[in-house]
Image: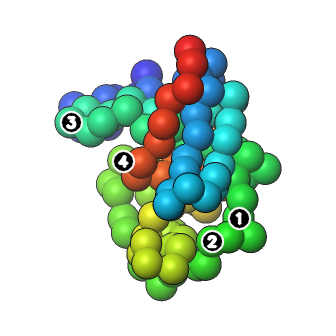
Amino acid sequence: MTVIRGHRITVEPGTEHVRVVRDGLLLAESRRPLVLRETGCPVRYYLPPEDVRTELLTPSETRTHCPFKGDASYWSLPGAADLVWAYEEPRAEVAAIKDYFCFYDTELIAR
């Protein structure tokens, strides 16, 4: 667990089977997500790039900054702007999520 100014973040290997489907199109499927738990936020599943169909995604110009994780870059689908993000240079405390993709909507298949 990392605590930064009272804010807690944990990143752990998960055993969940995570799928991301949008409009019937499978965008990602992984049985080896990283599970990120953060104060005040929903649990997020960060998926290895090889488990994401990156050829379907278009880089976005959107960038955001999180004081606890770093600077995020975003990708979109037609009709779904900024659907997924990744930290290319995360803070050292959450270095495990480097280049892993996180989607707003994920589906847990099994644990």
Indicate which disc, 3 or 1, sits on the residue closer to the N terminus.
3
3D distance between C-alphas at marks 3 and 4 = 12 Å
Q: Residues within 10 Å of mark 3 (few under 14, many from 20)?
A: few
Judging by the rendered image, the residue that carries numbered circle 3 is: 40
The residue type indicated by label 3 comes to Gly
Assess whether mark 2 and mark 1 are in contact (beta carbons under 8 angstroms): yes
Q: Secondary structure at mark 1?
A: helix
Q: Secondary structure at mark 4?
A: loop
Judging by the rendered image, the residue that carries numbered circle 4 is: 68
The residue type indicated by label 1 comes to Thr
Q: Quadrant of residue 34?
A: top right
Asked whether 49 or 111 is in front, the reply is 111
Indicate which disc, 3 or 2, sits on the residue closer to the N terminus.
3
Seen at 51% across and 80% down, the residue is 78
Between circles 3 and 4, the one closer to the viewer is 3
Between circles 4 and 2, the one closer to the viewer is 2
Q: Quadrant of the N terminus?
A: top left
83 vs 37: above or below? below
Judging by the rendered image, the residue that carries numbered circle 2 is: 57
